[in-house]
Structures are given as C-alpha cells and as structure tokens.
Image: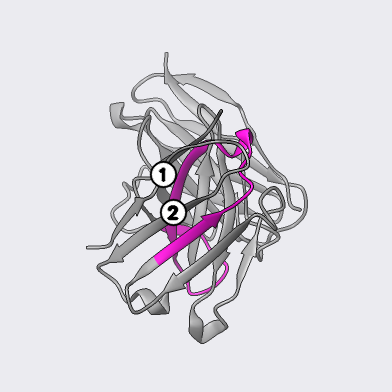
C-alpha cells in the first residue's frame, strides 16, 4: 500500500525558514517523480514544484510564486522527499501535500499524503 | 502559463441527478487532463486521468471527456458520498501544472 507521510509543518515568522519532509513507502521511491502541492485555508490547490527521478536527471522545477525561495530534494536511500522553504511570506500559509506523479513523467498526482500545515505569521 | 477555468463554481444537485462540470484550458493541452475529488479536511483523490481514463477503484458513474481546450466531468447518478469539491488539472509539461479553481458540489 502506498503511503506518504508529511511532517515538519508549524508556525514560523515572516522571513523565516522551514523544512518539510515526506516519508514514502509501498512503492519504489527512486523510480517515481514527486511533487509538492499546497492549499491555502479555504482556497484551491496550487502546484509548488516537482522533482524528477534520478534516472531522468533528478532536477526540480518550481512555480513562479515560490521560485528562488524553495528547494525540493530527494533522498532515495531513505525514500524521503524534502521541501526547504526560505524567506517565508504570509501568503505561504497553507497545507502542504506531497504527491506521487503517476506516469513516470509530467503527469497527474495519483497518491497524496495527508498534508502538513505551515502557518506564516508574526 | 496555462490557465484552467472550471464552471460552475458551485453546483446544487440531488441524489440521483446527473451532473456535469466543465473545465476549459487557455490553450490546447491535448488530453493531458486529470480530475480530483476533495472532501473537507482530506487530501484530494485522483478520479480520472488523460481526460477520460478512470483510475482503478473509482466508481463507473464518474466519466470524463473532451480534448484540446474543453473537458467535462460527469457523474451519472449522484450518490451521497459524491458531495465534495472537484478540481481539474492540466499536465501538458511543467509550465507549471495548473489546477482549476474548483467546483463545490452541494446537496440541493
């Protein structure tokens, strides 16, 4: 059974940093492209970024609102996806979900974690 | 960036009704479209991918259609468990991927 468990959320002041993790199990993590998606309170879904498998280059791409402030990385030896967020703004307040990309490329998100809440506030 | 626009934003319907949600893309995305269902306090669940392919385990009352810039999600006979918010998503390359704003399906 595929499981994705996010952790690391919490309250942080504007300008601060936070690192989120996503522990994956139930599939061959190294083969799968992964993504982060966020949802501000009461709002819709927004892609944050995605990272390719190492076999496909292992590079990450980011959405414009977060580009330059976040880094997505993966540790295939630990089946863990990470999201390093710096220079946080109030508008980064959201539930952050990690998700698998279902087709080995640019794709839909077929499995999701339960999410972790990040609150940016002074 | 590719913009996705869903309509309606809110839909009121009754158990047993047939309902259709529309999603329009700002440029052609071929069939690279997915639909998700989200209930309050829960993560989204994938229903349909590649515009019309049903994910394994999803009830057959859900169906998707369309290509290019116009797409539909149809629920043939609403069940109580179907009242939720639905999102479309394009994945025509990471430009980035984008979601529609959501359609909230409410009980009439």
Instruction: From the top left corner, tell me how far across and down residue A96 is, in percent.
Output: 46, 46
In percent of the image, x 48 and y 75: which residue is there?
Answer: A104
Question: Contact, CB < 8 Å: mark 1 with mark 2?
Answer: yes
| Quarter of the figure with the C terminus of chain A | top right
Chain of residue at mark 2: A
User: What secondary structure is marked by label 1?
Assistant: loop
- Identify the image quadrant of residue A72: bottom right
Q: Nearer the viewer, residue A81 or B7?
A: A81
- Which residue bears the numbered disc 1? A9
**Residue B45 in view in this figure:** yes
Q: CA distance from mark 1 to mark 2?
A: 6 Å
Instruction: Answer whether residue A93 is magenta in the image.
Output: yes
User: What secondary structure is marked by label 2?
Assistant: strand
Q: Indicate which disc, 1 or 2, sits on the residue closer to the N terminus.
A: 1
Instruction: Answer whether residue B15 is magenta in the image.
Output: no
- Identify the image quadrant of residue B16: top left
Residue A20 — which label? 2
The residues colored magenta run: A81-110
> From the viewer's perspective, is residue B31 above or below residue A31?
above
> Is residue B42 toward the left or the right of residue A25 in the image?
right
In percent of the image, x 51 and y 26: which residue is there?
Answer: A42
């Amino acid at each position: 059974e595929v499981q994705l468990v996010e952790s690391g959320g919490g309250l942080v002041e504007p300008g601060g940093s936070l690192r989120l993790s996503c522990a994956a199990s139930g599939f061959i993590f190294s083969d799968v492209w992964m993504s982060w998606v966020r949802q501000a309170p009461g709002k819709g879904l927004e892609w944050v970024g995605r990272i390719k498998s190492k076999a496909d280059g292992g590079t990450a791409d980011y959405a414009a609102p977060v580009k330059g402030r976040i880094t997505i990385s993966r540790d295939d030896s630990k089946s863990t996806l990470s999201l390093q967020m710096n220079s946080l703004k109030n508008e980064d307040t959201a539930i952050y979900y990690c998700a698998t990309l279902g087709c080995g490329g640019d794709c839909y998100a077929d499995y999701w974690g339960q999410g972790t809440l990040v609150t940016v506030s002074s | 960036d590719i913009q996705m626009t869903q309509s309606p934003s809110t839909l009121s319907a009754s158990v047993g009704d047939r309902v259709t949600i529309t999603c329009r893309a700002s440029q052609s995305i071929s069939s690279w479209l997915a639909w998700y269902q989200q209930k309050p306090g829960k993560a989204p669940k994938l229903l349909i991918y590649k515009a019309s392919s049903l994910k394994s385990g999803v009830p057959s009352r859900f169906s998707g259609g369309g290509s290019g810039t116009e797409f539909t999600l149809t629920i043939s006979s609403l069940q109580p468990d179907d009242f939720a918010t639905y999102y479309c998503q394009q994945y025509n390359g990471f430009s980035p991927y984008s979601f529609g704003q959501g359609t909230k399906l409410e009980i009439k």
